[in-house]
Image (cartoon, rainbow, N blue to C red):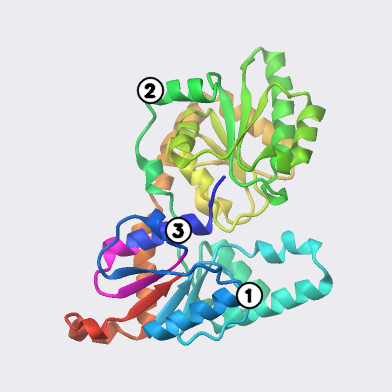
Amino acid sequence: MTEFGVGTYTRNVVRALGRLDRHNQYFLMGPPQKMAEIGPLPSNFQSVPLLDGDTTVKGSLAFRSILRNLSCDLVHIPHLFWLPRALPCPYVMTVHDVLEHMYRAHGHSGLRRFLHFQLTRRMLRGAARIFAVSRFTKGEIEKLFGIPASRIEVVYNAIDERFLRGHTNDSDRQFLAERYLVNYPFILYAGRISPHKNVVRIIEAFSALKAELDKESKYPDLKLIIIGDELSKHPDLRRTVIRGGVQNDVRFMGFVPIEVLRIFYDSAKTFVFPSLYEGFGLPPLEAMAHGTPVLTSNTSSLPEVVGNAAVLVNPENVFEIMRALHRVLLDQTLRERMKQRGYDQAKKFSWDASAREILNVYENVIGQRSEKVRSRNDEESLPKVANT
């Protein structure tokens, strides 16, 4: 897939702030093409090109220089970072997960892991406030880094507005059949492909499910469609497909744009997402917005996100995943109940509601609450917020 996490978050938060806040002055720093993806914004939002990544020495120095020249009152960094920065103003930061200090870090040397952890903790402790995308992530930050709960705000993610455009029509389904040759029932997975996403067990569960359905003479043409990274990067998945004997029944689509992904969500019989670890986990909500029954994990943030609208399983138990898929496919009463609950659950998350909470923190940190009325008509005194 494309930029699921930080990119989606940044675009939607900025758009929501643009709808809600005409008072504060915002500077959006980053590559011009990324700024263009956000779309039109009101006049109190200004794009400032930052051509070098802010994780490089050159980019970090340019970033700090821009903040100083603009006399910014606050900077919002929308991801966890660890490189030391001497910023000229307070900063808030968003933590989507702490995966870097779990699965991915295990391949690094002990010294590198130690330095990475210590520097990350230092930057977290230096933040004026931290936004965690779930209560689960807030708890992880508290436990792992010793950050007081009072300095962490839970501000949920929400789905992109393009997933809220209603159900697909005959033309959409015809497009799927002609462009992607999909004209059969299918189970869908969409998301990044990495070890913690548990895609190998999805394939193993699907293989067992096909064997079970064959015995019952049901869904003979059922397929598993995996939308995510290119398969060439993950040879273990192809080996799992061959080992399970489902070479003709598993399709890897690679990247598809959101406009096409919504058609896949809408057309799927079931969406399966048994991830081992999620800081939030947007794909299950995206599927729910289309009325598609969701099967997901009973671990990390996922029960918090999906509520009572999904079937929860132990993600490490292949046969539990298989049995749950079997039930969701064949129990029509359950499917109808999940469909309605899914609609209701997806509506609980809103970028506008999240942006209001973020804005409250901005103003609290800047200390402008009491001055807001007096300075409303004074352009020179507008608080300046930088987003990168």
Which quarter of the picture shows residue 95?
bottom right
Residue 128 visible in the shown view: no
Which three-letter amino acid code belongs to the residue tagged 3?
Lys
270 or 384, nearer to the observer: 384
Q: Which mark is residue 82?
A: 1
Question: Which residue is at a point 50% across and 81% down the rendered structure image?
Answer: 64
> Which amino acid type corresponds to the residue marked 1 in the rendered image?
Trp
First reached walking from the N terminus: tag 2 or tag 3? 3
Label 1, secondary structure: give it: loop
At x 34%, y 55%, the residue is 39
The answer to whether residue 256 of the structure is visible from this angle is yes
Tag 2 residue? 171
Instruction: Give the SS element for disc 2.
Output: helix
Q: Distance between the residues labelled 2 and 1?
A: 48 Å
Residue on which disc 3 sits:
34
Disc 2 to disc 3, how far (Cα)? 31 Å
Foreground of the two, 203 or 74: 74
**How many marks are shown on the rendered structure?**
3
Q: Which of marks 2 and 1 is nearer the N terminus?
A: 1
